[in-house]
Amino acid sequence: MKRHRIIGMAVMLAILQSTVYLPASAESAKYLRGDLNSDGKLNACDLTLMKRGLMTGFEPLAAQIADVNADGITDRNDAEMLRDYLLTKIDNFPEQYYIEPETPQIQPLSGSRQMEYLSRGVSAVSSGKGVFVSWRLLADDPAEIAFNVYRTTDGKTVKLNDKPLTGGTNFTDSKADLKKNNTYSVKAVINGTETDTDGSDTLPANSVSNARIVNIKAGGQIHFVWVGDFDGDGNYDYLVDRNADDHQKLEAYKSDGTYLYTIDLGYNSENKNNISPGSSAIDVGMWDGATVYDMDRDGYADILLRIADGVTFADGSQYHNSNASAQEIAVIDGRTGTLKASAPVPDDYIKIGPMACMMEIGYLDGVRPSVVCWMKNRNKDKTFNSMTAAFGYDETGTFRLHWKYKNEVLFNNRTEYKNGYAEAHQIRVADVDYDGKDEVLHMGYALNGDGSLRYHIDEIVHGDRWFVGSFCNENNGKEMYGYGIQQNNQFGLLEYFYNASTGEMLWTNYAKEGTTDVGRGNIGDIDPRSDGFEVWSFQGLYNYNGKRLGDGALYPCIRLWWDGDLLAESYNDTKFEKWNWEAGKAERLLSPWKLTDCRGSERGAPMFYADITGDWREEVIMTSTDFSKLVIWNTTAPTDTRLYCLAQNPCYRNCMTAKGYYQSHMLDYYLGTGMEMPQTPDISIIPKAAQ
């Protein structure tokens, strides 16, 4: 019989530190009951390991091997049986005492919503005195999965943990030589058997901060970054805009900074007016006009882009149309930057001119991704023509328009709506009734997945910030809530909380007299004394039931999940902050510019933020001041909280594709103090693409 190592058995390693056996492949692994030191025989060492294991506990595979009498229980009866065999000088068992543990299998998810393959997403950054390593827990991981962490330095690989890790998916390596390159990898342990996982990460020598620096081409201003897996390796790659260039451009890079290609948006991107931009202009005002997602579900992310005459793709080919106002929604191959498919933007308002565009991905039929485009142009009398349209591949593989909904808007002073329903500076796409199909939400109305009107709320008018998601445990899996603020509402409405599935108002705050521009608002769990999320604006801090908790809170910018607890943090104009609920004040966690050259956008927001690597906490993407680097900030706070990566949550993944006036991402379950552990998302994973 081959000799094998019992993987991960700390008690065995404590005795046999000088002997290392390589495990056989999972297909050929065969173990002798009682042979706890894997030398192929029964001896006193096995009995010692047996007794120690009965006191301190066995790992799953070791427990099977220690079950000498094969009754399914490892107890003192097994130790006595092993002792009796040794006293009679029997050093082996009959064939029936061999076991072949089942090869660990990860059961595939079977939901109808097909989402991208993600690797283990190992991330390694400096924590100042060591290396903070984190990795993804994936939605299809079994509940009992554990992990081992390995470091490779100068060609030598060592395992860093004594026992497989079963808590939070992070580990701090305090013994690494930071003057050298250190590469970290993670292996999964299922039923005591170790298996390889995709991905590793190298921390370069002499790294001094928790920022990952990705070198890209020098160029003009970058305002937005999008992420998607262009090359199919399970890691997120980057698309950046050069939005201030005369001809705007999009540049694609691999996750390591390898340049892929450039798309030139042509002469129709020269007009950068933030209300009536050129027909191919992107990222002006609230109009992004682009996003990234795997639209045809082939395992490679695509670029979704509104195009017009003169746009040049990466292969040098151009889109041409004799009408400069005519536009199409294009699907561009993320690997090559070449056009794959396109469909015309409806021409209902083409006589007025081109339409500005905002995009977000949603699964409107619960199966296939669609790109939802909110588009507007302005009439001479300063009223607006507003249209929401959904595009995607149908069952025949044709990319086309699915539906359109027109909301002709007339208002005075930008806030008093006389016709049409209220809109804000962003859209939300989420499954508000948890039936598996996403809805499309504007601030004052909502559309079903087929484009029909679901409801409208007349007293809501314009407001910059609003949020839709699960805000408390009782919200999970039932109906989502919404929270928004108002700007100079003619009815005096300041802020409101409502049922996002039905449009029913749950509580409101009205001005005592006159109107007020509330300006900003946000939502998250920042006070553990109150159940669920709190909401805060310049009007004060409230719990989700509408009870006033105080006058102050964090500046309402971008809510983050950053440190080791379940309370939310904030990104505010390049500062990372946390609300000290006991002292009633905001406290600084991180001043990025003090650690490395970096900047956010001129709007006080990052270029991108989301859970894009490592465990469930969120990363923040900034740039260097000369726009030649992406600066990606990673947390270094240990946590025992174990959650599947946020990017596999359907509501959150939709949010990752949205821009507008950049907003906090939402989940379809409550994440905060006292949270219930989320259910496995009802998704399936697109097979890993052939590379």
Image: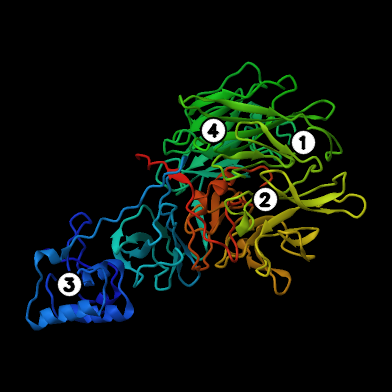
Amino acid type, mark 2? Tyr
Provide residue 115's location: percent of width, then percent of height: 47, 42
Which circle's residue, 1 or 4, is located before the other in the chain?
A: 4
SS label for mark 1: loop
Residue that label 1 marks: 421
SS label for mark 3: loop
Tell me the tag on residue 263.
4
Task: Name the residue located 73 percent from the left edge and 19 percent from the top edge.
Answer: 351
Cα–Cα span, label 1 and label 2: 19 Å
SS label for mark 2: strand
Which circle's residue, 4 or 3, is located before the other in the chain?
A: 3
Cα–Cα span, label 4 and label 3: 63 Å
Amino acid type, mark 3? Asp
Compared with residue 179, is residue 110 higher up or lower down, i.e. above or below? Answer: above
Does the CB distance between marks 2 and 4 fall below 8 Å? no
Tell me the tag on residue 481.
2
Residue that label 3 marks: 35
Task: For marks 1 and 2, give the one nearer the viewer.
Answer: 2
Task: Name the residue located 59 percent from the left edge and 66 percent from the top edge.
Answer: 674
Q: Which class describes the residues within 10 Å of circle 3: few (<14), some (14-19), or many (20+)? A: many
Task: For marks 2 and 4, give the one nearer the viewer.
Answer: 2
Amino acid type, mark 4? Ile
